[in-house]
Image (cartoon, rainbow, N blue to C red):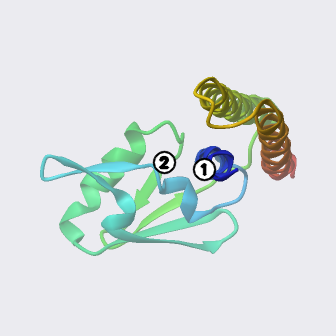
Amino acid sequence: MAMIDDVKADVESKMKKTIEALRRELLSIRTGRATPALLEPLKVDYYGAPTPLVQMATVSAPEPRLLTIKPWDQSTLQAIEKAILKSDLGLTPMNDGKIIRLAIPPLTEERRRDLTKVVHKHAEEARVALRNVRRDGLKDLEDLEKEKLISEDQHFKGKEMLQELIDKYTVQIDQHSKAKEAEIMEV
């Protein structure tokens, strides 16, 4: 039974990572509300090296529709501004020499629909990843049974365990995507 537990632990660990990756992806999708997480994936060209913005500046949301970026090194203001303009955020930075302000405009109805499609795409990719992890786990169980390390009954119990895991994590994917959709559609 210990071998089945090893397979289960491995599968569950991979499924948790899938959920965490989905959560990070969803955080980076812009909604009508300002959130510092919006800028987490942004890389700035800092002395020739792509550096995450969060390692170069303090990002805060003093108002619901405004982000402020205060670089620790004032000489990086232009590079940060350039990175924001090149990104696909669709935001125009306002630089006063000390701080960069990003006004987050309200989303249009069409843009909201596009963003919900992106959320659906990420959720479906996460579901596919879960199914791939389950497939690998099932293969591991088959291999264990072929090598006579587990019985047919244990193989069957292991399959049921993997199905319970995928059901549990699929529910989490649905919860994350529905919450993000509601956040996007909120006017």
Q: Residue at x 47, y 56 (%)?
A: 40
Residue identifier under label 1: 6
Q: Residue at x 78, y 39 (%)?
A: 154
Of the two numbered discs 2 and 1 in the rendering, the one whose residue sits closer to the viewer: 1
Res. 72 image quadrant: bottom left
Residue 12, horizontal then vertical, whole percent: 66, 49
Residue identifier under label 2: 92
Q: Which sits earlier in the primary sequence, circle 2 or circle 1?
A: 1
Label 2 crowd bin: few (<14), some (14–19), many (20+), radius 10 Å: some
| Horizontal side of residue 60 vs 83, given as left or right | right
Amino acid at the residue labelled 1: Asp
Q: What's the distance in space between the residues labelled 2 and 1, CA to CA?
A: 50 Å
Q: Residue at x 63, y 30 (%)?
A: 148
Res. 117 image quadrant: top right
Q: Which mark is residue 105?
A: none
Front in this rendered view, residue 79 or 4:
4
